[in-house]
Image (cartoon, rainbow, N blue to C red):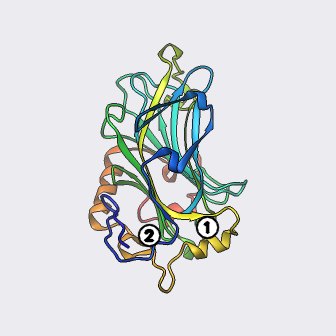
Amino acid sequence: MAVSMSGSFVLFVGLVLVGVVSSANFDDLFQPSWASDHFVYEGDLLKLKLDNYSGAGFSSKNRYMFGKVTIQIKLVEGDSAGTVTAFYMSSDGPNHNEFDFEFLGNTTGEPYSIQTNVYVNGAGNREQRLNLWFDPTTEFHSYSIFWNQRHVVFLVDETPIRVHNNLENKGIPFPKDQAMGVYSSIWNADDWATQGGRVKTDWTHAPFVATYKGFEINACECPVSVAAMDNTKRCSSSGEKKYWWDEPIVSELNLHQSHQLLWVRANHLVYDYCSDNSRFPVTPAECVHQRHQ
């Protein structure tokens, strides 16, 4: 069987792809998780609404380990200050793992910001923030999380914007033993989202609407009944069972991707926890060793 991935992660390899899921239809993969009355379906488009009564959110029907998740989003137009639209993967429990995209609303004319974060064993505080190089409210753009046992890669239109490497050989935990659900939501966060909370949500612009399409999950599905360690084993290549996310071609960024990441960091990164000496007088251990941050 052949699998085709778009953009930077392209493979045409004869593989046995056990448990791999792929679809572009919301109902095949996801379900509303709260405020279903704030969902609007227009053909292939899904719209989530935020007003002064409620936001809304959805979750995947299943959990996954390793692979790639992509959603195309057109973010809230106009004055979206105080709002947050999130796309993320997360496991369950207090010691959960989590990979976050958070799109922070703006005042009209200001650039939209993306904040990413990585939780490992329940510990986060690994925020990075960047300003986008395009207006994400006028057209759809793809946002992806790629995850294997070597690294986690955050991508915007297939351009890597962040890499979190496996540094277990340095004694640093890496999220590879908990299956994750896939989630998205829109909510009011005007206590912190825009200019540190100084700019509040203007409800005269409500409802605030985020629009979605192109839902893709190319990952290993993990039944709830299967133990965590068994999931790790069943979602890893061995013998005749080969998964595309374990192939050498995606084990690290290629030269072009590395240049893209450097360009993003040089031109659009506005906050990196690794450089925040006031929050972290002692540099976090992974920041000392990361080649791609």
Q: Which residue lies at the image location 55% right of the left edge and 58% below the top edge?
A: 283
Is 72 left, or right, of 99 in this rendering?
A: left
Number of residues whose C-alpha sits closer than 10 Å to that of mark 1, classed few (under 14), some (14–19) or many (20 or more): few
Identify the image quadrant of the C terminus: bottom left
* Residue with the most extreme top position: 204
Q: Which residue lies at the image location 66% right of the left edge and 60% below the top edge?
A: 121
Number of residues whose C-alpha sits closer than 10 Å to that of mark 2, classed few (under 14), some (14–19) or many (20 or more): many
Residue 73 appears in the rendering: yes
Residue on which the image places disc 1? 173
Q: Amino acid at mark 2?
A: Trp
What label sits on residue 245 in the rendered view?
2
Q: Compared to 176, does 193 lie above or below?
A: above
Q: Amino acid at mark 1?
A: Pro
Q: Compared to 167, does 78 lie above or below?
A: above
Residue 172 placed where, x, y %? Answer: 59, 68
Secondary element type, mark 2:
helix
Residue 1 placed where, x, y %? Answer: 38, 73
Question: Which mark's residue is nearer the viewer, 2 or 1?
Answer: 2
Residue 66 appears in the rendering: no
Is 15 left, or right, of 199 in this rendering?
A: left
Q: Compared to 104, does 146 lie above or below?
A: below
- If you read the primary sequence from the N terminus, does the residue marked by circle 2 or circle 1 appear first? 1
Q: Which residue lies at the image location 48% right of the left edge and 51% below the top edge?
A: 275
Q: Distance of mark 2 from mark 1, alpha carbons?
A: 20 Å
